[in-house]
Image (spheres, helix red, strand yellow):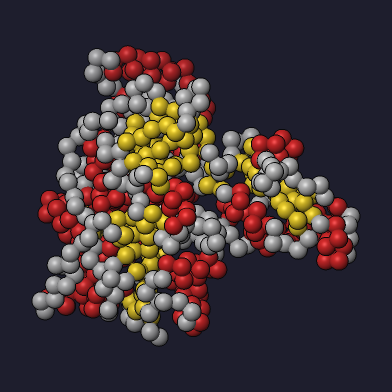
């Protein structure tokens, strides 16, 4: 089992985390915001952040939400973070929703999760007003992050914070003294998938806190670190590693203004650390190398890397001085980049480390709170996802002759199960072991190498997962479609184009579309596929189709032989 390399504080639950870290780092900045004056920033301290959490939590209990489920949806912002922790540290269960979902999926997940309240930004006013009018959900309280005062039965988060403050000043301690059951569900998270196929993962405070302690034991952040929050906060990776972990360590957090502004934000906010998907780091690294090449400095840099790597063997680190231009382009303070969600290009990982910016790769699943393994401040191995965290046991199930098999994980970060889905829980959890669905091997030193997805999941470069079966279910509903096969066609840039091979029914298409001419039919069915696309987030869009009247290759149990089918289209 992996040994911790850093000391860490133990937390029993997220309320305990806020209390202990707040006592230590209360006066330090927790959030940094731009002002209208260039170079001037507004700060919210860790104490103020915790006060706002306490005020909102007190007001939510006062509304009658004790023990209830509360959803939150918006872009990354301060109010999201306050809402999340207020709900989970004394009120009830928090349900973070994907901000990129189309309205029909948001509505469906609100129904499925049985939430009694939802905290949201004005971007979702339309769907919330519709849900409110229909009255077909359990939602009693709609809470706007943007309203200054209550309007048309829509509550104002700002106003609730003020009300909670007054209640506490009058002696109300219901939220402050609330006890947390760290073993039961505190967080409900939906896996990516359509409303019919997405699963609701049940996580406890114990799950999350075990992960926070594991992260702290191998990757060091200090109160002087500043994180850039870029990935969506509803994503467990960003929520645990990019939000809860830095809050527990007294760091400050700045919100990225969008992918186009990343480079500027890193400089403006003097960011020291960030987490993201590999494609972002790979893009930054390519730009750096192209810039070096344009200036004719490539050979000089290569020699510099050789010299600095040699000196590192003797404990002499000159990388920040030697590659000052690279550091300056990244704001001058960047020291730690963490990648997760997809495989990181080893060239980019080695490149950043050569320049003196620690670049490490991690791996996890929503079902494991989420981080299972990561490289750390001391041990790295290119191409690996590092070693399993100290509290976790890992093993390879049914390894082949190369030692590759499904990666199984056991420990305190593993989910309680899937909500209202006993069958899926039994398939995924066996005797406490989580079946990750990933094929991997573990070397003699404990480094884990992921070989690929077990169930044909298409992993895009931005870290998003595409589940072919999910899209096939939707395509198969189109009139005249007999069956379909969704696959990822490799692109030159290393990403995948989502394509579908569609088998049409000659008899039905004649009546439905008035033709059996394949070219005309292809265009007509393509229009229907585009309608399907509009019900999903853009990254799931099917970009290309082929048509045939021949049945797909199947097993005797009528399952598509995907390895055989892929050969017919690529």
Q: How many marks?
A: 0
Q: Against 303, is 84 above or below? A: below
Pinpoint residue 475: horizontal percent, then vertical percent: 68, 57
Q: Against 164, is 79 above or below? A: above
Q: Nearer the viewer, residue 540 or 214?
A: 214
Question: Residue 479's image quarter?
Answer: bottom right
Q: Is residue 314 left or right of residue 381?
A: left
Q: Going 22% across and 66% down the picture, which residue do you hit?
A: 90
Pinpoint residue 549: horizontal percent, then vertical percent: 82, 50
- Answer yes or no: is residue 81 visible: no
- Answer yes or no: is residue 196 visible: yes
Residue located farthest toward the bottom when viewing the structure as drawn: 152
Q: Going 41% across and 60% down the picture, which residue do you hit?
A: 419
Quadrant (top left/top right/bottom left/bottom right) for the N terminus: top left
Q: Nearer the viewer, residue 346 or 173?
A: 173
Pinpoint residue 444: horizontal percent, then vertical percent: 36, 21
Q: Is residue 291 left or right of residue 385?
A: right
Quadrant (top left/top right/bottom left/bottom right) for the C terminus: top right
Q: Going 53% across and 62% down the picture, which residue do you hit?
A: 195
Question: Residue 320's image quarter?
Answer: top left
Q: Going 48% across and 21% down the picture, which residue do you hit?
A: 298
Q: Against 516, is 335 above or below? A: above
Question: Residue 532's image quarter?
Answer: bottom right
Q: Is residue 508 left or right of residue 291?
A: right
Q: Nearer the viewer, residue 540 or 210?
A: 210
Pinpoint residue 394: horizontal percent, then vertical percent: 36, 35
């Amino acid at each position: 089992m992996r040994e911790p390399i850093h000391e860490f504080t133990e937390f029993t639950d997220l309320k305990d985390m806020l209390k202990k870290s707040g006592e230590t780092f209360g006066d330090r900045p927790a959030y940094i915001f731009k002002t209208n004056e260039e170079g001037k920033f507004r700060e919210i301290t860790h104490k103020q952040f915790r006060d706002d959490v306490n005020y909102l939590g007190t007001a939510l209990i006062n509304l009658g939400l004790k023990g209830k489920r509360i959803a939150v949806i918006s872009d990354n912002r301060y109010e999201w973070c306050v809402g999340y922790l207020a709900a989970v540290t004394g009120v009830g269960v928090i349900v973070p929703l994907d901000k990129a979902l189309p309205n029909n999926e948001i509505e469906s997940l609100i129904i499925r999760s049985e939430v009694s309240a939802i905290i949201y930004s004005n971007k979702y006013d339309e769907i919330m007003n519709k849900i409110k009018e229909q009255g077909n959900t359990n939602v009693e309280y709609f809470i706007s992050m943007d309203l200054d005062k209550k309007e048309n039965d829509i509550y104002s988060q700002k106003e609730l914070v003020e009300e909670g403050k007054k209640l506490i000043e009058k002696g109300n301690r219901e939220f402050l003294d609330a006890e947390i059951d760290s073993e039961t569900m505190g967080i409900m998270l939906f896996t990516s998938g359509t409303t019919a196929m997405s699963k609701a993962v049940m996580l406890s405070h114990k799950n999350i806190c075990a992960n926070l302690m594991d992260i702290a034991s191998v990757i060091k952040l200090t109160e002087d670190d500043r994180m850039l929050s870029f990935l969506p906060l509803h994503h467990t990776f960003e929520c645990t590693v990019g939000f809860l972990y830095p809050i527990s360590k007294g760091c400050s957090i700045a919100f990225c203004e969008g992918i186009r502004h990343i480079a500027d934000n890193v400089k403006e906010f003097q960011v020291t650390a960030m987490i993201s998907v590999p494609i972002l780091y790979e893009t930054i690294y390519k730009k750096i190398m192209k810039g070096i090449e344009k200036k004719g400095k490539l050979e000089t840099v290569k020699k510099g890397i050789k010299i600095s790597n040699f000196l590192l063997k003797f404990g002499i680190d000159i990388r920040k001085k030697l590659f000052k231009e690279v550091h300056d382009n990244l704001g001058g303070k960047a020291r730690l980049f963490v990648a997760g969600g997809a495989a990181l290009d080893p060239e980019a990982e080695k490149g950043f480390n050569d320049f003196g910016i620690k670049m490490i790769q991690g791996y996890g699943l929503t079902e494991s709170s989420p981080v299972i393994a990561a490289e750390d401040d001391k041990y790295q191995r290119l191409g690996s996802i590092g070693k399993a965290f100290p509290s976790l046991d890992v093993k390879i199930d049914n390894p082949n002759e190369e030692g590759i098999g499904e990666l199984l994980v056991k420990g305190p970060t593993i989910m309680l199960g899937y909500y209202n889905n006993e069958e899926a829980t039994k398939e995924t959890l066996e005797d406490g072991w989580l079946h990750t669905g990933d094929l991997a091997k573990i070397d003699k030193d404990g480094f884990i190498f992921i070989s690929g997805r077990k169930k044909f999941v298409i992993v895009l470069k931005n870290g998003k997962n595409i589940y072919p079966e999910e899209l096939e279910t939707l395509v198969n509903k189109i009139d005249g479609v007999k069956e379909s096969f969704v696959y990822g066609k490799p692109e030159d840039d290393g990403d995948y184009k989502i394509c579908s091979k569609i088998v049409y029914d000659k008899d039905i298409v004649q009546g439905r579309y008035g033709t059996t001419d394949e070219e005309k039919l292809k265009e007509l069915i393509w229009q229907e596929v585009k309608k399907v696309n509009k019900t999903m987030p853009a990254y799931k869009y099917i970009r290309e189709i082929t048509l045939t009247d021949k049945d797909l290759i199947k097993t005797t149990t009528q399952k598509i032989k995907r390895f055989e089918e892929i050969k017919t289209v690529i």
